[in-house]
Amino acid sequence: MTGAGTWSLGESDYERINEHLTELLKECNARCALVVDRTGQLLANAGEELSFDPTVFASLTAADFSANDELAKMIGEPEFASLFHQGEKESMYLADVARRVILVVLFDKRTTVGLVRLRVKQTVQDLSALLDEMFSRAPGQADKGGPLDGADDEIDKLFGK
């Protein structure tokens, strides 16, 4: 497991993650999708505006997933790749993505857990590939294309480095 402090999420990475989340929401008619790292940091979210504090939710999501990892070990499983919590009106589906982040999908009666689960599989594969790309970069090397892209080089030129 790798924490958020050992990698960087650049602007185009964030946009690509959001594209995957938006597509997932369209495909399964869910309300909201979030990506949370294993330390509890909210990395991205798409869909309906949340009626609760997303920072607290991200923290609790990571704790929930960690607790369930321990439960899995107790029964002889290496991990639970996904979790499903069903409520009377609202439900959530959580899926591990490359042992690095957690994909959370919030949905109501407009869809089914089966459809969410089916569509999450492809999104997990897509996000895993994106994360592999992000983690393969040299430390401190963010994606290109942000508003400050090249700023370090320009500052070095100014100071004759």
Image (spheres, rainbow, N blue to C red):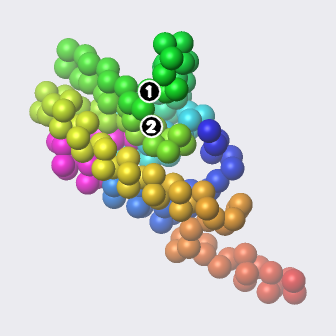
Residue, disc 2: 96
Q: Quadrant of the C terminus?
A: bottom right
Question: In the visual, does 64 lie left or right of 117?
Answer: right
Q: Nearer the viewer, residue 124 or 139?
A: 124
Please report the residue visible at 54 percent of the width from the left and 18 percent of the height from the top: 73
Which segment is the magenta one? 21-34
Residue at mark 1: 80
Place residue 70 in its image quadrant.
top right
Residue lying at 30% horizontally and 42% vertically, measured from the top left: 120
Q: Residue 36's spot in the image, x, y percent?
A: 49, 39
- How far apart marks 2 and 1 lie (CA) works out to 8 Å
For this orientation, the residue located farthest to the left is: 110
Q: Tell me which residue sits at (15%, 31%) in the image.
A: 112
Vertical placement of residue 71 versus 118, above or below? above
User: Depth check: 106 or 96 in front?
Assistant: 96
Sequence-wise, which precedes: disc 2 or disc 1? 1
Left/right of residue 28 with respect to residue 81 in the rendered view: left
Does 29 sit above or below residue 161? above
Please, what is the three-letter code of the amino acid marked with disc 1? Phe
Name the residue type under label 2: Asp
Residue 3, percent from left and from top: 64, 41
